[in-house]
Image (cartoon, rainbow, N blue to C red):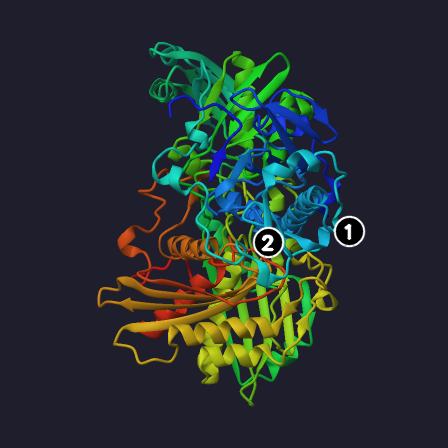
Amino acid sequence: MKISFPFKKINKTETITSEVFSASRRDFLKVGGILSGGLMVGISFWSCNSKGDKKTTVAPNVYLSISSDGMVTIVAHRSEMGQGIRTGLPLVLADELGADWSRVNIVQAEGDEKKYGNQNTDGSFSVRMFYRPMREAGAIAKLLLMQAAAQKWQVPVTECDTADSQVIHTRSAKKIDFGDVVEIASKLPIPTAKDIKLKEPGQFKLIGKETPIVDLHNIVTGKAVFGIDAEVEGMKIAVIRRCPVVGGSMKSFDDTKTRAVPGVIKVIPIKGAGLPATLSKPLAGVAVIADNTWAAIKGRDLLQVEWDLGPNAAYDSGEEIATLVKEMAQHGTVRRERGNFAQAKAKAKKVIDHTYIAPHLAHATLEPPNALAVVKNGVCEIWAPTQNPQGARDAVAEALGFPADKVKMNVTLLGGGFGRKSKPDYIVEAALLARESGLPVKVQWTREDDIRHDYLHALSVQRIVATIDADNKLTGWNHHIAYPSISATEDTFVIQPSDGELMLGASDFPYNVPAIRIETHDAPSHLRIGWLRSVRNIPQVFAIGTMLDEIAVARGMDPIANALDLLGEDRSITFDQELVKTTYPNYGEAITDYPWETSRMKGVIQRVAKESGWGKALPERTGIGFAAHKSFLTYVACVVQVYVDAENKITIQRVDYALDCGVAVNVDRVKSQFEGGAQFAASLALKSAITVKDGQVQQGNFDGYQIIRMPESPKEIHVHIIESEAKPTGVGEPPVPPFTPALCNAIYAATGKRIYSLPIDLKA
C-alpha cells in the first residue's frame, strides 16, 4: 500500500453520482502529480516511467486512475483525522473494482468541489454520502477493463469478471493483469452508471472486513505528515496574542521589547471579526513572526497590548447557568407537542422533575490548530490540517480578496478534529500574515491558545418533567431546553436552539408517550460557539438517558425492559406532524430514506443486554447502567459497568456497545471509533469543563481542562456490530451520546446517587 500527499515535507448535494465526473490530465496533476507530461488521449493520457518507457494510464473517473504497470491510484477526497476515511472510501472503490489492495496507491486530494462534491469531513456522513458513488466509480472502471479484455480475447464481456487486479475469463479461467489491458481501455468510451451492475454483498472481499488503515505504519513509526510537520523553504513561525474576550478589539500595542528578541522578524496586528465572531474569521490580535517557535512565543510574551474588551467582558458562565436554571421554571417556546401535558400532570400519581446541567467544553485536539501559507504573485497556497478544505479555501479567498481558484488548499493528516478543524480561522490567520509579511508563514497555536480561543461547545441547562399515572404508565414528558446556539456565532440575534440542534436527541424523542411537550428558552451567546463531536446530543441525551433510568426505577421496572416497553410496537416514526414552527432535518436525509425504526433500536438494546451480561449478580459498590440513542442515523445501545470505592473513586470496569450502522464498511475502524468514542465521552463525563469569568476562559492547559489519563480509562471496551445490508450510516459521533447517561446510571446502581450535573463529582 502506497500513500502520498501533494506537498513537500522538509525533514521529516449534494447528489453525488460517479458518472458526473470525467477526469482529465489536469485533474490528476492537481492531486499530487500522479503523472507528468505526455499525450492526452480522450480522458486518458500517456506519460513515461522512470526508465523513459511510455506508460499508459486510464482515468475513468475523478477518483481513480490505473496505469500500465498495474498500479491503481485512488484519490482520497475526505480529510483523515484518525477515523480511517482515507482507507474506508478507497476500500469501497477497490472492492467494487476487484483491485488487489496491496497494489493500490492512495493520494490526498486538494479542496475542489467541482470534482469531488462536498469535502467537509464533519457530521459522520462521509461513508453515508459517498458509499454508492465510490462503488459506482469502481464498477465503471471494472466494466471498462472487462470490455478491454473481452475485446483482446474476442469473448463476450458478460463472461468476464475481475479479482486481485486481474480480469478473468470465467469460462476458460484465463487471466490478464489490469495493466495489460489499459492501452485498449484508454481508447474505449467511458461507461456510465446505468451500464453497470454492482456487486452483491456476498461478493465483497474488503467491505465489511477488518482492514488496517493505510496510514498505520507511518503513524506508528513517526513518518506520517500532519499539519504541524509541513514545511517549505524559508518558512517562518507566527504566534498570536488574541483578545481574551470574544468581540473585543485592540486599542494599541507596544512591541519595543518584542522586537529586541533575537529571531523576531515582524509584528503584525490582525483586525479580527468583531461581532458576530463568525465560524471562519480570526479574532482580533497581534502576531509575532520569527525564525523559530521559541522566539515567536518569547516575543509574544513581551508584547504590551491594550484591549477594548467589548460587550462580552462581563460574561460569567456560573451566573449564566444560575440564570437559566431559574428560567427553566417558566413556560418556553413550544417546539413539539403531542397530546395534553398539563392534563397528564394533573392526573399523575407520580411526577419526576429534575434539571440537568452541562458545562462549556473545548475540543482539545492532540494537535493544536496550525496552518502554513505562501502568498506570491496573486496566488495563495495553504498546507493545513483541515476538515473542510473547500470552506477554508473560500474563507482565505474572501480574506485576501482573491478569486477562489487562486487559492490552493493542501490537506494534511489531522491530529484530531472533533469539529474544531472544520472552522478555518487559523488558516485565514496564516494567509493574512503571509500576505502582509511577504514570507512563508506557519501559524502555530499553543495549547493555551487552543483552549482559551476555541469554538466552545455551549453550556446547557435542561429540565425534564415526567408523569406516571395510576396504571404505572409514563403519560407525560415535558422537556425544557436552554443553551447558546451555534447559529449565534454567525448571528448575535439568535437566542434559541436551531431545528438542527433540537434534532440531536430532543425533538426526535422516539418513545411512545401520550403527552410530549418540548420547550426552548432564550440563551444569548457570549463566546464563539461551535460543534464538537456529537454536538447537542451530548447534553440532551445526558438528560434524557438519566431521566429514563429514573422513570424505570419509579415504575419498578428493569431499565432495559422499560426502554423496550416505551418504544412500543415496531414502527417507522416521523416527527413533523408534532413539531411546532420546527422542522426535522434528519441529518440532511429524507425521513423516507432513513426512517426512525423502533425495531432496529430494539435490536441493539437486546444485543447489548445479551453481550454485557445484563442482570448478572455484581459485587458490592459495583453497578451496571444502560442507555440507548440514535444519532447520525445509527442506532446505539451502551452498557457501562463501574466500581465506586469508599472514597468515591470511580473505576470504569467494562463498556459494551451494540450498534446498527447499516453496512459496516471497515469493521476495524468502526470498532476503533467506538473504542475512542468511549474514551472521549469518559473525559467529558468525568473531567472536562470550561468556565468563563469576566468574559475570559479560565482554563489554559490540561492542568485546568482535564482529560482522562490511562488509569481512569475504561478497562474493557467491547463493540458488537449488527450485521446489516442497509445503507451505511455514521460511526464517528454515535458512540458519545449514550455513554454518559449509561455511566451515570451505573453510578446510581452502585451508590444510589443520581447525577444531575457534569462533570461528575461524587464528593460534591
Residue with the most extreme bottom position? 471
The label on residue 194 is 1
Q: Which image quarter is the C terminus in?
A: bottom left
Q: Is residue 695 left or right of residue 94?
A: left
* In the depicted structure, whether residue 436 falls above or below residue 569: above
Residue 621 visible in the current orientation: yes
What kind of residue is marked 2?
A: Ala
Q: Position of residue 618 (x, y in %)?
A: 29, 77
- Packing grade of label 2 (10 A; few <14, some 14-19, many >=20) is few
Under tag 1, what secondary structure? helix
The label on residue 173 is 2
- In front: mark 1 or mark 2? 2
- Please name the residue shown 32% across and 67% down the image: 642
Q: Position of residue 178 (x, y in %)?
A: 60, 41
Q: Position of residue 696 (x, y in %)?
A: 44, 37
Under tag 2, what secondary structure? loop
> Which quadrant of the view contains residue 756?
bottom left
What kind of residue is marked 1?
A: Lys
